Image (tube, rainbow, N blue to C red):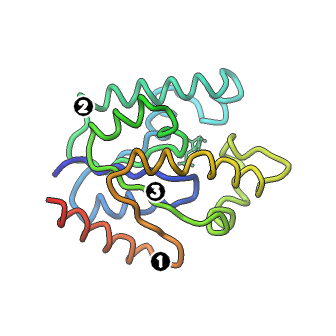
């Protein structure tokens, strides 16, 4: 089966859904953040603190290019900011079927509020920060995605069921 790529805002459920989907479809699971951390031998907050956001974004693009060659039969969860670069959106669509997991601001806030591992959310006003980033990114996620699936008020099992239905319909 073609790779399945999950995109969306931080806290949209990409990693949780991705791991389960990979298991159900008997595919490998891959997380771009995790792969960058392993390859760099340091955490994302460390990369941001030492070399800045642009360096992290370059690492994302580099990884995406590498994945065009070496990644098959995988469910891939990508960092929330990766689809912001136009080049990355093109690379994502070449890599497989891109699914946008969307959620409301309220849902996102409830999921990320106590998380200190996301440098993009370091802010005195978390709500305003999330609102602004979501607003800026929404159309970019939609432009990158083949499918848009809302996760609000849906269980993980239901989201998985919808994804499976959509994937098999598309085949
Ligand atoms: C980011 C999202 C994070 C991670 C990094 C930047 C973003 O991934 O890539 O902290 O810009 O939205 P998750 O979406 O998996 O949290």
- Find numbered disc 2 in the image and state the secondary structure of the residue it sits on: helix
Give coordinates of residue 33: x percent, y percent. 49, 40
Quarter residue 46 falls in: top right
Mark 2 to mark 1 CA distance (whole Å): 33 Å
- Find numbered disc 1 in the image and state the secondary structure of the residue it sits on: loop
Q: How many labels does the image show?
A: 3
Residue with the mark numbered 2: 70
Give coordinates of residue 96: x percent, y percent. 26, 44
Mark 1 to mark 3 CA distance (whole Å): 14 Å
Mark 2 or 1: in front is: 1
Residue with the mark numbered 3: 14
Q: In this view, does 119 lie to the left or right of 79?
A: right
Residue with the mark numbered 1: 154
Using a 10 Å C-alpha cutoff, classify the residue at mark 3 as few (fewer than 14 neighbours), some (14 to 19) or many (20 or more). Answer: many
Q: In this view, does 8 lie to the left or right of 74?
A: right
Q: Give the position of the C terminus as an image quadrant.
A: bottom left
The tag earlier along the polypeptide, 1 or 3, is 3
The correct choice, above or below, for 150 with respect to 8 in the image is: below
Mark 2 to mark 3 CA distance (whole Å): 21 Å
């Amino acid at each position: 089966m073609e790779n399945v790529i999950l995109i969306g805002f931080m806290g949209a459920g990409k990693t949780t859904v991705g791991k389960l989907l990979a298991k159900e479809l008997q595919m490998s699971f891959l997380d771009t953040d995790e792969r960058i951390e392993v390859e760099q031998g340091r955490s994302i907050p460390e990369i941001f603190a030492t070399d800045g956001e642009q360096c992290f974004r370059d690492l994302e693009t580099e990884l995406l290019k590498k994945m065009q060659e070496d990644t098959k039969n995988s469910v891939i969860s990508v960092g929330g900011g990766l689809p912001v670069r136009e080049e990355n959106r093109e690379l994502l669509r070449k890599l497989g079927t891109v699914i946008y997991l969307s959620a409301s601001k309220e849902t996102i806030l409830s999921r990320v509020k106590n998380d200190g591992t996301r440098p993009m959310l370091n802010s005195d006003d978390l709500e305003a920060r999330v609102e602004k980033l979501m607003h800026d990114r929404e159309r970019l996620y939609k432009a990158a995605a083949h499918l848009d699936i809302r996760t609000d008020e849906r269980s993980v099992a239901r989201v998985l069921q919808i994804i499976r239905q959509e994937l098999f319909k598309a085949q």
